Image: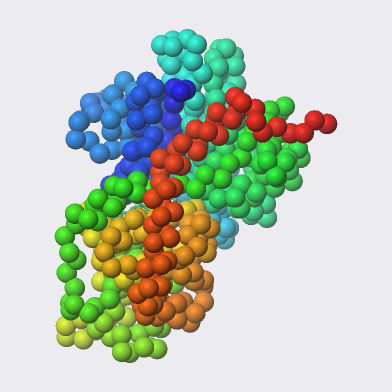
Amino acid sequence: MAKLTLSLMPDLDCMQVMMELAGGLVTAVAPVVVETGGLWVGWSGLHLEDQNVEIPESDPNDKSPTAGLKSNQVLPVAVTKQQFDDYYNGCCNATFWPLFHSMPDRATFQADKWEAYRQVNAEFARLTVEAVKRLHESDPGSVPLVWLHDYHMMLAANTIREKCDELNLAIKMAFFLHIPFPSWDIVRLFPWDDELLQGILGCDSIGFHVEDYCLNFIDCCQRRLGCRVDRQQMLVEHNSRTVSINPLPISIPYNRFVELAEAAEQVVKNNPHEQMLLGVDRLDYTKGLVHKIKAFETLLKKHPELIEHATFLQVAVPSRTDVKEYQELKEELDQLIGRINGQFSTPNWSPIRYIYGCVSQDQLAAFYRDSSVAVVTPLRDGMNLVAKEFVACQVGEPGVLLLSPFAGAGNSMHEALQVNPYENNEFADAIYRALTMPKDERELRMKQLRKREREHDVNFWLRNFLKTVDCLIDDERQFPPG
Ligand code: GDG
């Protein structure tokens, strides 16, 4: 197997959560990096100004994304604080995050932030080439695989390719996007869309969660760059190279969640008949938190018999807390929840239990297991792992997954109850239907959901990804001649 060089830029919002999210990924990917003697290029958390601070040696109990890797297998990237802010807050989170979630009104387009994005990607590329050099020195015949992750790293590929060509170092390159890839109508709003598309096309194999995102990307390449494309085989020709586009729905370490759910303590309820509705989201405008809490309010108005019997437990993980938009969202949610609790609470019960923070993964597994309904209703979401984790943790009485069709997960989790989060009344009715669903129907739906997620776990995702890279060598997928 090819030595793996992984370029990863973990989201910095809530390190604990991102480590676990990366944790799922890392459980699958890190052993490959370790076994193949690969290298990991990642953000160190330090700025250039802090370079005299020593990077700690890896600790055996460390749960970080790079756990299991020896310190000489990790190449930390460091840039100046200003450069980093412009790149991370100014471009990644203020431009690509809203734009790729098809919310262009929230996106800002600034040339200096885009320039910072170019520079930081160039620095990642420089270090990745260093990593490739080292891998070639240790094993001259090998063809290392460089795997770039997410919207933080869309411009690194061509720089890496050019430099490696100059140095005569053979490599393969792949990219995986964790968020949606939007339609051409949205992408064309970005003033440097051609550079962006060419940046991604620098890789040999490109993965998105679902087929729709792949087709959007192919469409953009054809319309903006005039590339020759094959939608059937999902191929794009660029600079005389054939690039393969692959739907690769990410998943979770399923068995780990089953084990956690089987071992977790019981969640304390107000009374034995209380039904718990659960939401677990980063506090982000794409996750539709306000919509779901308003739908619960409508439910309580329509069905007052649920008072003291149905409680909404919402875990909202702090995210991008230094950004005004996120602060305003928190404010809005605080007020909304306060108002609903004020209106419907009784001496012994409040309709909404609200945790603003991170809970432990054991605690999360208990919440998943003991909830009657998981309300996973983003306005837009690349995949959504919470839907999958909930299903994995259903080891007792089966609950119901209420899922938005605007999450990538909605493409495959057919047995979930689907609801459009934008329509308040319909949303409230769907929650009611979930709370009152007969046991045999719940069992049937959950059995199918669990079977699919068990078979298609994060290791399955990784194997499929590695297959797409092997296909590059086998040349199975080709444009027809002419
Ligand atoms: C991006 C894409 C795509 C949440 N609260 C707590 C906690 N979590 C963990 C969950 C889950 C993860 O965070 C959240 O993952 P999601 O997939 O729901 O969402 P994003 O953070 O937006 O992730 C998304 C994903 O990348 C993977 O490609 O699915 O579409 O946006 O694992 O369990 N973990 C703990 N305490 C919490 O309070 N311990």
Q: How is the image coloured?
A: rainbow
Q: Which quarter of the picture shows residue 83?
A: top left
Relative height, residue 71 to residue 288 (above, below): above
Q: Identify the residue at horizontal 16%, vertical 60% (top origin).
A: 265
Residue 132 higher or lower than 187, as above or below: above
Q: Residue 142's spot in the image, x, y percent?
A: 49, 15
Q: Quadrant of residue 103?
A: bottom right
Q: Quadrant of the C terminus?
A: top right
Left or right: 56, with 324 as reference point: left
Q: Is residue 53 visible?
A: no
Tally the marks: 0
Q: Is residue 379 left or right of residue 49?
A: right
Up-down: is 482 above or below 186? above
x, y percent for residue 424: 48, 79
Q: Position of residue 223 (x, y in %)?
A: 74, 46
Q: Nearer the viewer, residue 192 or 132?
A: 132
Is residue 430 visible in the rendered image? The answer is yes
Left/right of residue 273 with respect to residue 242 in the rendered view? left
Name the residue at 31% across, 71% down: 372
* Residue at 70% across, 45% down: 231
Name the residue: 35% across, 74% down: 439
Residue 256 in the image, given as x and y percentages of width and height: 29, 47
